[in-house]
Image: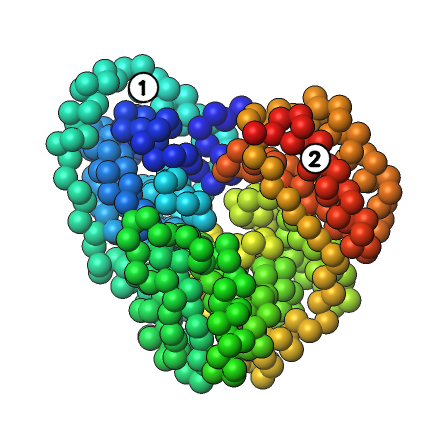
Amino acid sequence: MRQLFGTDGIRGVAGKYPLDQQTVLAIGGALGQRLVARESSPRVVLGQDTRESGAWISSALAAGLESANVAVVSAGVITTPGIAYLTRTHRFSAGVVISASHNPWQDNGIKVFGADGYKLSDELEHQIENDIFAHLEQLAEAASHNVVSNSEVLPGDAALQEEYARWLADSVADVELGRFRVLADCANGAATNIAPLVFEDCGIKADYLHVEPTGRNINAGCGALYPEHVAQAIAAADGKYDLGITFDGDADRALFADASGRVVNGDAVLLLGARDMKAHGTLAGDTVVATTMSNMGLEAALRRDGIAMLRAPVGDKYVLEQMLKTGATLGGEQSGHILFRDGDATTGDGILTALRVLSVMVRSGQSLAELVADLKVYPQEIKNIHVREKKPFEQLPSVMKAICEAEQDLKDKGRVVVRYSGTEKLARVMIEAESEQAMRRHTDAIAKAVQQAIGV
């Protein structure tokens, strides 16, 4: 069982284990040692979001890599999918992103891409963990701090950022997007550097919110965690904008608002994307891969169009694994991670998703609201409970009793999903039902049982 890696890399509070300087140095050394064993002159590209801890974590990680004779190139502040793109196109041995995605500024994380631009498998992450623990045993704390303190902040290569932005714009070069007016919330994160370059290149008229990062305001009351804020601004603008876009901290996902100010989530994007791709013969197997959290309404709407929906565990890497296994060319999450495999992308990309949504609007001649008007969303509630430990639910009798009662009551008229977050110490309870009253009753009952058993 993996101890350091969650569903999206290694994540925690910056400065505390496993993101203290000594462990970060060990992570760099372990990764470097593995790369050196595989090739003679390995190179790694690093990127980060706008958190103030990103500089010293990048520096410590680079020191560990360089101690294993790995060359390091920094792309500076760039999106997570930007590093995936640069890794595969420049044939780097690996790519590493310093980011905690949608988490608050105090957190940070380390995500690793292989040379092919894909996130690492669970098996490989487990192997690397063993290497990291071995390196920690070899490091004397004082020596590790000396190495880190002598490291300089890595200068970012703006040319790499511009290259990635051009690739995004080129991906929709065959569609005229210049007629659109959009409002984009960059979450004071990595999209701040990239989105304006891309939208300008595409001729999109864009205004921006939250593009003044301080190192401590990433995701703070903005971005994809708060899509209703852009939606409210769109509604107040009274027809000024065709679309609202909200990115998360590392811009690997995006949520939207239509011209009337209604939030449009990842399920709706999967629906409009699937219909467009099927119409153009690029939806392989007429199949979409979603997750256990996607609404039953999406499954029903896709079925009406003759499109099958498969469900993967939560986490875009697991969606991608299912896509690669089945050959599917479209997959994603309700939270806005959308993976398009009819092109060169190897991971979810919020800016690319925004461009694809706008492209569908052009080709269809319909507004965003019209494209998803028939999506009937079943009442759904998600409750997050802070927990002190992630004990298997099967070992919590009161929780299992509440879950079983909900499942027996709802049967084929609803769904029950109870799981732990892969990146935070949270238990997530999701209930979906035809009856809103039943949904709330069972959500409250299970959440209360979890809180009493292992809640903080």
Residue shown at 30% from the left, 60% from the top: 212
> Taking 86 as reference, is 201 above or below it?
below
Q: Earlier in the sequence, mark 2 or mark 1?
A: 1
Asked whether, in this view, residue 292 is left or right of residue 179, the answer is right
Residue 130 position in % (x across, y down): 41, 21
- Circle 2 crowding by C-alpha within 10 Å: few under 14, some 14–19, many from 20: some
Residue shown at 50% from the left, 54% from the top: 225
Picture quarter containing residue 98? top left
Residue type at mark 2 is: Lys
Residue 365, can we see it? yes
Residue shown at 22% from the left, 59% from the top: 158
Q: Of 321 and 55, which appears nearest the observer?
A: 55
Asked whether, in this view, residue 437 is left or right of residue 29, the answer is right
Asked whether, in this view, residue 29 is left or right of residue 406, the answer is left
Asked whether, in this view, residue 277 is left or right of residue 33, the answer is right
Q: Which residue is mark 2?
A: 448
> Taking 422 as reference, is 305 above or below it?
below
Q: Secondary structure at mark 2?
A: helix
Q: Which mark is residue 202?
A: none
Picture quarter containing residue 315? top right
Residue 124 position in % (x across, y down): 46, 31
Residue type at mark 1 is: Leu
Q: Of 193 and 232, which appears nearest the observer?
A: 232
Residue shown at 21% from the left, 52% from the top: 156
Q: Secondary structure at mark 1?
A: helix
Which coloring applies here? rainbow
- Circle 1 crowding by C-alpha within 10 Å: few under 14, some 14–19, many from 20: some
Q: Which mark is residue 136?
A: 1
> Taking 370 as reference, is 294 above or below it?
above
Q: Distance between the Cα atoms at labels 2 and 1?
A: 40 Å
Query: Which image quarter is the C terminus in?
Result: top right
Residue 386 position in % (x across, y down): 56, 35
